[in-house]
Image: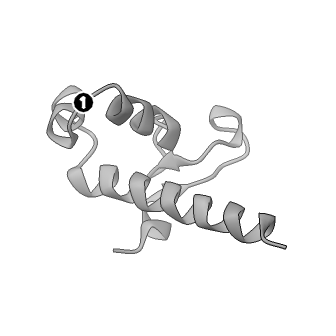
Amino acid sequence: MNYHDIITIEPGKRGGKPCIRGLRITVSDVLEYLASGMSADDIVEDFPELTKEDVQACLRFAADRERRIEYLRAP
C-alpha cells in the first residue's frame, strides 16, 4: 500500500497537518484513537468516511516518519 495516495498535506487545512484524503481528520487524530485503545474497526464505525486502509496508511506514515527522524539523528 502506498500511503502517499491517502495522506494529504494542504497548508490551509488543519494547520498543514497530514490529513486523510483531504478530509479534516488528521493522522495524529487516528494515532491518538489507536493509542487510546480503539481498534481500526472502532474508528471506522465512529468515522464512516474512513476505511481500514486509511487507518493502516496512518500507521505506515507514522512508521516512515519515525524512520526518517532516526536517520537524521544518526551520526
Quick check: 50 left or right of 32?
A: left
x and y percentages locating residue 61 in the rendered image: 50, 59
Residue drawn where x is 71% and y is 71% of the image:
71
Instruction: Tell me if mark 1 has few (under 14), some (14-19) or many (20+) residues whose alpha carbon lies within 10 angstroms of its own.
Output: some
Residue drawn where x is 43% and y is 31% of the image:
32
Q: How is the image coloured?
A: one colour
Quick one: 19 or 28, which is closer to the camera? 28
x and y percentages locating residue 36 in the rendered image: 34, 25
Q: Which residue, given by chain and number where applicable, does mark 1 sit on?
A: 38
Q: Quadrant of residue 69?
A: bottom right
Residue drawn where x is 60% and y is 58% of the image:
66
Quick one: 38 or 51, which is closer to the camera? 38
Quick check: 50 left or right of 4?
A: left
Q: Identify whether 54 is placed above or below 46.
A: below
Q: Quadrant of residue 75?
A: bottom right
x and y percentages locating residue 73 in the rendered image: 79, 64
